[in-house]
Image: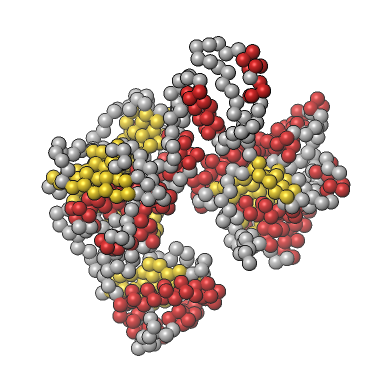
Amino acid sequence: MAVPLRFDGKVVLVTGAGGGLGRAYALLFAERGASVVVNDLGGDIKGEGKCSSAADRVVEEIRAKGGNAVASYDSVEEGEKVVQTALDTYGKIDIVVNNAGILRDRSFARISDLDWDLIQRVHLRGSFKVTRAAWNYMKNQKYGRIIMTTSVSGIYGNFGQANYSAAKLGLLGLANTLAIEGQKYNIQCNTIAPTAGSRLTQTVLPQDLLDILKPEFVAPLVLWLCHESCKENGGLFEVGAGWIGKLRWERTQGVTVRQKNQQMTPEAVRDNWKQICDFDNALKPKSGQDALNELLNKLDTKEGISTNLTSSPVQTSTSSISPVEAIGKKMPLKVYTYNNFQPILYALGVGMTTKDPDHLKFLYEGNEEFCCLPTFGIIPAQGSVTDGFESLPGLNIDFTKMLHGEQYLELYKPLPTSGTLKSEGTIADILDKGSGAVIILDVHTYNGGDLICYNQFSTFVVGAGGFGGKRRSDKVKVIVQPPNRPPDAVISDATSINQAALYRLNGDWNPLHIDPTFASFGGFRKPILHGLCSMGFAARHVLKQFANNDVTKFKAIKVRFAKPVFPGQTIETEMWKEGNRIHLQSKVKENNEFVLTGAYVDLQDTVYKPRANDTGMRAELQSDVVFAEISRRIKDVGREMVKKVNAVFQWDITKDGKTARQWTIDLKNGSGELYQGVARHQADTTFKLSDEDFMEVISGKLNPQKAFFSGKLNIKGNIMHSQKLEMILKDYAKL
C-alpha cells in the first residue's frame, strides 16, 4: 500500500476557505495533519459585505473532527494581517493556497471602472499581497509551497468576463515568475484552473453540470502539489470532476520573413501566413529565454543574419554599484552544522573512490585516520556567496550574471569531521573591469573561538562595470604562472557522467549544473561541472603526489577558473614543485583546453599535532565499537524502534575530562539513524560520561543509577526516556 501523504507539522493558509473549493482544501489539509488558517472575508460573490460566520463554520467543522484550525476574517488585500494570523497562532507558514475570489460579470462594453478594479484587487492584487507577506518567511526557512488559482476563462477567454479573465491570466504570469525566483529557496509555485461547483461558478454553469463538479474532486491535486515530496514547479493544471490535465505553451516553427540586406514587408508576412500559423511539428518553449534562443538560432543558421547572441543569453545591464557603500560591509553570519556525512559526500563529489585504498580515510567514518579533504573548507563558507549579497547596500546587481572567477583557501588547522562552524564574510574590494565588475569577498570561518580557515571568492558580474572604480587591488590573492619547464608530475582522473549531480548536493544548487534547459541559457550544450569541483580534483592530485594524502601538510590553494568541464570528461593536472609551493594547471584531456590556470598549492613544513579532544583527528575510543553496532541495529529495525521509542538521545563521550566524541541516536524522525555530532533535531535526553564509564555501564559492571548519583553520569532533559534505551543497548555480548 502506498504511503499516505501527510502534512504533520505544516501550517497551511487557505484564502476564501469559507465554502466551496477553499473549504474542501481546508478540510482535507486538516484531515492529513496540517494546522490550517481558514481565511474568508464573508462577503457575497460581488465582493460586498463582511461576515465571520463562513470561516467560523469551517473551523468548527475541522475541530469537531479532531483537527487544528483558526479563523481569519481579513481581506486578502490586507495580506500582512492574513499571514500574521498564521504566525501569531502557529509561529510559521509553510503553504499558501490563493483561492479567494469574486465575480462582477459584464460584457466588455458595460464594464465599469469599479467592476474592473475590484476584480483585479481581489484576485491579482490580493494573491500578490498574501504571497508577498509569506514569501520572506518561506525564504528564510528554505521551504514553501504556493498555489495560484487561475480559470479556464483566463486561459481561453469567456464572454462577459473580460475583467475576470485578465486577472486570472495575470495570476499565471505571477506564478511563473515566483516559480523561477523561489527555486533556489525550495519554494515551489504552481497554478490550477479548477472547474467546480461554488458560489462563483453557479452563475455560469448549468445545475446538472454543477452536480458532478464537486470541490472534493479538485482538492487532492492541490494537496499533492503542496506536499514536500512533490517536485512540480511552475506547472499549470486544469482539473474538475476527477479529471486532471497539464497545460503548456506551444508555438509553430514559424518563418523568418526578414532577408539579409532586404527590406521586410507586410506582403512577405501575408505570403508566409499559412506556414506562420502551421502547428505541425510545433515547438514547446519552456521559458522566455528558451524561446529567444531558438529565434536567434534560426536567424544565424537558416537566414545568414548574424546576431552574435546565439552562444549566450542577451545581456542587458540593470546593475549599479557603489564601492563606497559596499566595501567593508559584513555579510550575515552563516552557521554550518554537519556530521561525518557531509565530508564523505564532498569527497565523493570531487572524485574520491573506494577503488583507491588511500581514499578510504576520506570515505569511511570508522577508519582510524578518518578526516576531511582540505578543500572541504569551501563548503561552510559558500553560503556567504549564494545567499548573502542581496542584503548589502551598494550592490544592485543581477545575480544571474555573476560568474566565479578565482578562489583562494587557506587552512590554519585540519577541519573537524563534525561540528558547527561559523563564517563571516566581508566585501574586501570591488574592481571596475569595464565589461563587468569584480567583487572580492573575504570569508573567515571559526570553530568555536578559533579561526580555522579563510576563503577569498573573486566573482565577476557581467555588465556591471563602468562605474569609475579602480582596476586593481592589493587585497587580492594573486595567481602565479607555473615554471617554464616540463611538469614534475601529471595525474589524470575521469569525471563521472553524474559528477555535477553529485557535487551539487554539497549545497551549490545552481541549475546550470543539472538542468539542460538552464545550461542552454548560458550558451552551454549541456550542464557543466562546478568550477570548485574541478578545483577539488586538482587539490587532491597535489595532496596524493606530494603529501601522501596527509591533510596536515596542506596550507593553501589558489586557482583561476578558465573554462568549464563537462561531466564525463577527464581532468588532467600538471604539477611543478618549487620548495613548499606546488604550481599546477588542469586541462580537459579530451580537447586539451585548460580549465584551471595560474594555480598553486602551498604545503606545510611541519605536521599539525591535534589536541586530545580535537574531533578533526580521531583517537580510538572503546565506545566507538558499541555505537557502530548500535548503528547497524537501527538500520535493521529502525522503523520499529521509532514507533516504540519516539525520542532523540545525544551522547557526549569524554576522555581525560574533555569531550572527545558526540553521538546522536535519533529514534523520532524518519526511519531512525545514528550519526556523529550534535543532534540535528532537539535532543529529548542528553547523556554525558567518560569513555571508560560508558563501557562499564554498557557491560553491566556499573549500575546506571549509581553512576548518576555519584556524578559519573550526567543526564539532561527527560530522564524517563532513558528507560527506553534498554531495547537498544540490551544484549551487550553482541555489542
The quadrant where residue 561 appears = top left
Examine the rendering and report whether any part of residue 103 can be seen: yes
Front-most of 520 and 23? 520
Front-most of 592 and 56? 592
**Residue drawn 55% across and 17% down?**
258
Q: Position of residue 216 (x, y in %)?
A: 75, 55
Query: Is residue 132 found left or right of 710 in the rendered image?
Result: right
Query: Is residue 348 found left or right of 310 in the rendered image?
Result: left
Q: Position of residue 249 (x, y in %)?
A: 63, 36
Looking at the image, is 225 positioned above or below residue 46?
below
The quadrant where residue 456 appears = top left
Looking at the image, is 79 positioned above or below residue 269?
below
Looking at the image, is 273 positioned above or below residue 346?
above
**Residue drawn 30% across and 70% down?**
660
List the single residue furthest toward the right.
207
**Residue drawn 48% across and 41% down?**
516
Q: Position of residue 116 (x, y in %)?
A: 74, 31
Examine the rendering and report whether any part of residue 423 can be seen: no
**Residue drawn 38% across and 42% down?**
566
Q: Quadrant of the N terminus?
A: bottom right
Front-most of 36 and 33? 33
Query: Is residue 271 found left or right of 410 in the rendered image?
Result: right
Q: Position of residue 354 (x, y in %)?
A: 32, 61
The quadrant where residue 644 appears = bottom right
